Amino acid sequence: MDVIRNTDEIKSYMYGRKTAVALGAFDGLHIGHRAVIEKVLRQDLVPVVFTFRDNPAETLAGACRYLSTVEERLRVLESWGVKAVIMPDFSDIVGWSAERFLYMLRSELCAQVVSCGEDFSFGKKAAGNTALLSAFCNENGMELQITPAVLYRGERVSSTRIRDAIEEGKIAEVTEMLGRPFSFEFEVVHGNHLGRTIGIPTINQPFPDGFILPRFGVYASAVHVDGNIYCGVTNIGVKPTVGSERALSETWLPDFSGDLYGKTLRLELLGFIRDERKFPSLEVLRGVIEENAVTAREIYGQYVNESGAY
């Protein structure tokens, strides 16, 4: 899959190609986003996604709780079959007029089919909407496919709704709305190594600023290591028994032995087990973690059976 991060490169890359283009911010790539993107995958054209490296909310509102890293989004899009992703910084085009955006679609992206959600807007101060886009496509012989909101339990699936569910620890609901487990992919760093002293060595993955923080507590997880997947018991929070300067993900892999420091590992949250809490001693903590591991193995086993992961 090709990734273009500069709008100046679009025309030269697309020269001679006819495309089907999906439009959206696509933070998290949930089932509503997939419904939009699948419409360009069905065409006998080059399937392209136009999105942004950053979330527009970060520029427009000054803050955003990211559901995924750029790398994770690209991994998912490639797995779906997308052939090219146009991913500039939002700040690069925030000042574009709606007409400039439409020119890009027709003359630079060479779009024959355009797909978007019913609430899609574009151009400076969101001057363009689906009505304007529809009229433009009709005038220029392009096909527009507008996807209505996808519902889950009778309500619209949205990135905001998924963020709220993650912060509440509603992992089953998050998985349903994403269409896959919520995951993150961060570097493993050195911690205080106290886990080793009680026979439970862990991997530590700090959350970067701006990334969504799940409800503090213990989760069953699946950890991807060098092409293999292992059951994990993951604590997300500030480790109140021993203390931590910042929120991080700390995971025990009971079936893995080896050095993972410096590696960037993908971790999927499969189920919430309990809230984070402080224990009177490391020995008590060890006993509780071992109990949590029993539950984690059950959840992980169900995940493997249902998904075919191994």
Image: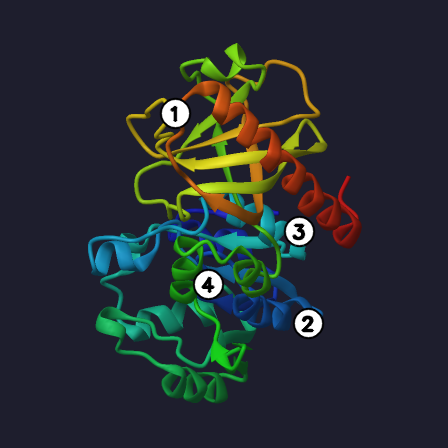
Foreground residue among 104 and 176? 176
The residue under the point 54% across, 63% down is 173
**Circle nearer the viewer, 3 or 1:** 1
CA distance separating discs 1 and 4: 64 Å
**Circle nearer the viewer, 2 or 4:** 2
State the image coordinates of residue 204 (x, y, percent, origin top left): 46, 25
Looking at the rendered structure, the secondary structure element under dot 1 is loop
Callout 3 touching callout 1 (CB < 8 Å):
no
* Residue 142 showing in the rendered view: no
Give the residue at mark 1: 280
State the image coordinates of residue 209 (x, y, percent, origin top left): 30, 39
Q: Residues within 10 Å of mark 4 (few under 14, many from 20)?
A: some
Callout 3 touching callout 2 (CB < 8 Å):
no
Foreground residue among 281 and 107? 281
Position of the C terminus by quadrant: top right
CA distance separating discs 3 and 2: 17 Å
What kind of residue is marked 2? Gln
215 sits left or right of 33 in the view: left
Identity of the residue furthest to the top in this view: 197
State the image coordinates of residue 179 (x, y, percent, origin top left): 61, 61
Q: Residues within 10 Å of mark 2 (few under 14, many from 20)?
A: few
What kind of residue is marked 1? Pro
Q: Which mark is residue 43?
A: 2
What kind of residue is marked 4? Glu
Callout 1 touching callout 2 (CB < 8 Å):
no
Give the residue at mark 3: 79
Give the residue at mark 4: 108
Looking at the rendered structure, the secondary structure element under dot 2 is loop
**Circle nearer the viewer, 1 or 2:** 1
Callout 3 touching callout 4 (CB < 8 Å):
no
Looking at the rendered structure, the secondary structure element under dot 4 is helix
Question: Total label count?
Answer: 4
